[in-house]
Amino acid sequence: MSESLTGNCLVAQSGGPTSVINSTLAGVITEALKHEDEINEIYGGLNGVQGILNEEFVNLAEESQLTVRGLRYTPGPALGSCRFKLKKQEDYDRLLKIFEAHDIKYFFYIGGNDSQDTSLKIHEAALAKGLPLRVIGLPKTVDNDLPITDHCPGYGSVIKYIATTVRELACDHQGMGNHDIVSIVEVMGRSAGWIAAGASLAKRKDHPHDAPHMILLPEVAFNPAKFVAEVQNVLKSEKFCMIVVGEGLVDENGNYVSASAKLDAFGHPALGGTADYLQGLIEEATGIKAKTTKLGYAQRCAAHCSSKTDNDEAFLTGVAAVQAAMKGESGKMVTLLRADTNEYKIETGLADLKEIANQVKAFPLQWVNEDGISLNYQFNKYAAALINGEVQVPFENGLPNFVRISNSRVEKKLGEAQAV
Amino acid sequence: MSESLTGNCLVAQSGGPTSVINSTLAGVITEALKHEDEINEIYGGLNGVQGILNEEFVNLAEESQLTVRGLRYTPGPALGSCRFKLKKQEDYDRLLKIFEAHDIKYFFYIGGNDSQDTSLKIHEAALAKGLPLRVIGLPKTVDNDLPITDHCPGYGSVIKYIATTVRELACDHQGMGNHDIVSIVEVMGRSAGWIAAGASLAKRKDHPHDAPHMILLPEVAFNPAKFVAEVQNVLKSEKFCMIVVGEGLVDENGNYVSASAKLDAFGHPALGGTADYLQGLIEEATGIKAKTTKLGYAQRCAAHCSSKTDNDEAFLTGVAAVQAAMKGESGKMVTLLRADTNEYKIETGLADLKEIANQVKAFPLQWVNEDGISLNYQFNKYAAALINGEVQVPFENGLPNFVRISNSRVEKKLGEAQAV
């Protein structure tokens, strides 16, 4: 496997972005430039596999060093993303034909669960045809639900932003606490409580009564009566009650408390309104006006409040992916491995895409306290390390100065695609 | 009026907080310490006039210098706030009795429109009784709707946070733009568009097509058909459509598009759900799933993204208030006066509370472009100066390290109050 392979490399992004998704891209570009014997051109594929099927490539080596540096703190997928699944054999055939036409020997795909599955299938299709192609998946998801890897780039930043927001809201509400205040913050998390749990970091050490007073996870069946009683309980002892809820909260029958009938492109239910549901419940049961904050997509792109640890690791996975491909690896995803030391230390590893694709890492229920609404020491230790350090985003005229790629297009070789 | 007056000073906070409300408090404390000939004790009144009526005072001179420095970046009212209107003559009588008992000769009240009215009435009540009391109001409101002053401390920070969030969301959506994305950000603004308008700063100079593509102000009657047509129009030319809407959006009959029957303590309608209303409208008319972000109270306490200009000015008003009181002023509010120079320069001034109390500065309609959904050069020039510079909030273990006052209580002199 480790024989030398020379050609072009292609990097693309897929799925929902994170605050640090382009730091991984910068890592790939930076490392790829160092391997001029193996890598001739560094192409970016626009809009993931959907754009690649249309030969939408840009020449990333033409980007200025300033732009590559700027990618390290620019949120959103700089190359564009997609939520598109390769379904038919023709899709794979065309993709590999395009790879051949453009002499793509290395393919780096930055994405979450669905995207790792796409990477695996491209790897297998190339193998089946005997084509020399090395495919490496790069982890990226605020959902933190990829298996094997200790955590996913993007997760540290989303929970740092949420914990910061909760701590600020606590200052706000604490000072307004001469009447009952119930405040509900809705965060992402369709099926797992990883993101909501991160709000736990807002509590100061040894201050278990700090906000958030209740964290509602999709893993813990929601009981309306118990919830209302707990809100009233908190209001008795604290000046306000702050609740953080994951959007995918379910009732005791496993139904979303606020489900929408619509499905997204992958057939997952599209949720929303969970905070509104809780607000209605509280107001009806207690007469207290509850306030809601819905961070929406702002939480997955809040680069101005991203974690330096997370950002550095995102870059590192990009570097490690290129290095692995140079060593002949394919069909693997870069993982982050936490050393079993007191001080937080991370190394990168590799996992078979077969063990990653379409798998979901469940939130460990042993990290939830018996009350079902708070997290224990193990979780806080796990998560606290991921939010350390602040990324110094350059501001200009009072606002973050994000970059855009110059979009230097590579000429198409196969012409227009079939409709995709 | 300028004869020397010696006694204690009392500072308190009222109404909804801002990210920089405690910077004003720090300004008052810092300046008050310099006038030891006139000011013996520096008291803080807890929970505004509501707490003052219960003699809930703390000794602010006992706070460490570290805490006073920390107040400069800690959001939420550190002394506690209230939404409480003195109504009966007995309230004023009791308040002045408490002031006499504690030898309060200087009263500084940090607040918005309603609070300036309270300050005015306390000033007048003291005058009527011939009591030596100097009352100075300090401006504080994210709503930016106090008259005479060029702008209000708190406003620069809320629009910096919103414009930053919009710019980040634009990066996110731009990259996901291989299918139609409609994104709605709901911001505060019950009756005026000051806050929503500030989102305009997210556009880069000379890039009028940047997000936000539509800013919906409470001042511009909402027309559903025109709105839907414009969303479709934007989607044709841009990769996504981003809308920023003030919560107090009204229809052509002047009714809130999403009104709740409930009223707050001051009889203002309590709003919410304006973004949800627009989302429903878009989905029904176009079938496109719209995404909503509701920044809620997070926008008024986002100290981690506050404006240094705003923060410095908030501090400056605190200093100016004490200096004015030392010169014998009373019944005044500190104002911010913008010099008529190209470079942004601010001086403080004083305005009669009579001209401030219960007045509302309307958003200048001549700053809205003819399209009704964007702001012109005059507004952007006005607002851009207010968001300059970043406050360096100290982070510890990855989160902002806010301070709390130590709550060193002053002994009550009159005993328990009547029920308030």
Image: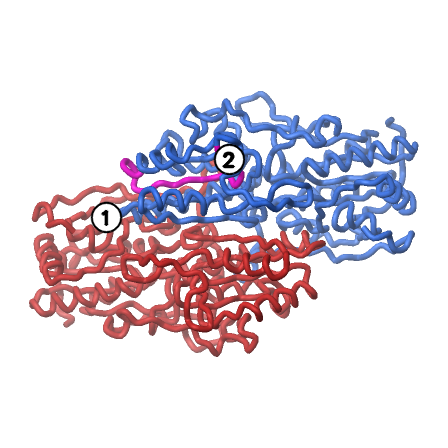
Chain colours: A red, B blue
Please identify the quarter of the rendering in which residue B341 is found. top right
Callout 1: SS: helix
Choose between A194 and B396: the one closer to the eye: A194
Residue B126 pos. (x, y %): 87, 34
Q: Is residue A290 left or right of residue B3?
A: left
The boundaries of the magenta stretch are B235-251
Q: Is residue A279 above or below residue B282?
A: below
| Residue drawn 39% across the image and 45% down it | B183
Which amino acid, by three-letter code, is at mark 1? Leu
Q: Quadrant of the N terminus of chain A?
A: bottom left
Amino acid beneath label 2: Val
Q: CA distance from mark 2 to mark 1?
A: 48 Å
Q: Is residue A213 left or right of residue B138?
A: left
Label annotation for residue B250: 2
Q: Is residue B226 left or right of residue B98?
A: left
With B130 as the anchor, is B217 left or right in this view? Answer: left
Q: Give the chain letter at badge 2.
A: B
- Percent position (x, y) of residue B153? 63, 37
Q: Determine which residue is flagged by label 1.
A: A60
Is the residue marked by circle 2 packed among few (<14), some (14-19), or many (20+) residues within 10 Å?
Answer: many
